Image: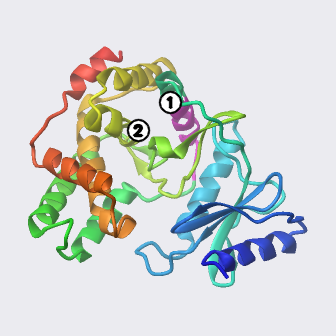
Amino acid sequence: MSDASLPIRAAVETARAHGVEVDRREILQDGHTVVVRLSESLVARVVTDREGPRQGGEWFARESAVACHLAGRGAPVIPMHLAIPPGPHERLGLTLNFWKFVRVIDAPPAPEEIGSTLEHCHRLLRSFAAPLPELGILDETAALLTRLEPGEFLSTAALDLLRRRLGESRDALSRFPMQPLHGDAHEGNLLATSEGLLWTDWEDTFLGPVEWDLASILWNPLVLEGDRAHAARILAAYRAAGGSVDHRALDHALVARAAVMSAWYPLLYPNPSPERREKLRFRLNWLAGATATDTAAICRAGH
């Protein structure tokens, strides 16, 4: 039996308990969560990490609530499956929920689509009234950094750097206006599908400045790849759709994003590839001040 056999069984049993027919067991993702397609329209997402820092179903419940709120208002998001209650569900000691299957197509999103769809989600998220943690992933990362021991990829000096830069940027971001956010708005969570460009994976949703989500989508093209034109087009589209951007908040959010990504490396990538090692080295050097980003100029170019 494969490692995915228990989560697949949990998904199948839960779906059948709600009267939904299961005719396949196609694994779409196998990692800290298992994503399995169970029918033409049904996908289950099952949490398999029982030892990581994020345990329990509270974050899963927030994700389900936010996804339902957005889909019900016509946002560009992957909707939950209507035949099964949003949950989250518990089965065989695992937490899971169910989503509509969408077909991913090979069509890289245009920067204009990225900016406009993110603004659309932000606009509709403002009416989400349920409680959300303030600056959630930043505080979660700060707590993680108190527990991390120096290792091969994060030295004592690197951990001290991450704690300092994250603390500084967190304090600065707490002074800007906040609203519900995606929380992890990178391009891997934005899918080109046969139904259009759709956002997914709302497990990190929290209250914070919109610039956090913008920093998440901009970090790779703007800082890692140096594609200022791409970043400016995303920002221009975000503004054209009705959003506003404070370049000071974006500066702090870019720093916080780099610190968060770096801190989670030992847990997410215990055996990182040479490419991932190089990205971590780049982020740490950038955080130490080896490079700088003129976000005011990028914002002006995208205005």
Q: Position of residue 120 (x, y in %)?
A: 56, 31
Find residue 87 and report its image quarter.
Answer: bottom right
Q: Position of residue 73 (x, y in %)?
A: 69, 38
Q: Residue at x 23, y 37 (%)?
A: 251
User: Which of 299/267 is in front?
Assistant: 267
Which residue corresponds to mark 1?
114
Q: Residue at x 67, y 82 (%)?
A: 1
Find residue 159 and report its image quarter.
Answer: bottom left
Q: Quadrant of the C terminus?
A: top left
Against 207, residue 228 (above or below) is: above
Neighbours of disc 1 within 10 Å: few (<14), some (14-19), many (20+): many
Answer with left or right where residue 92 lies relative to residue 286: right
Under mark 2, the amino acid is Ile
Against 169, residue 92 (above or below) is: below
Residue 174 showing in the rendered view:
no
Neighbours of disc 2 within 10 Å: few (<14), some (14-19), many (20+): many
Q: Residue at x 66, y 69 (%)?
A: 96
Residues shaded magenta = 117-129
Q: Secondary structure at mark 2?
A: helix
Which residue corresponds to mark 2?
217
Find residue 42 and report its image quarter.
Answer: bottom right
Q: Residue at x 19, y 57 (%)?
A: 167
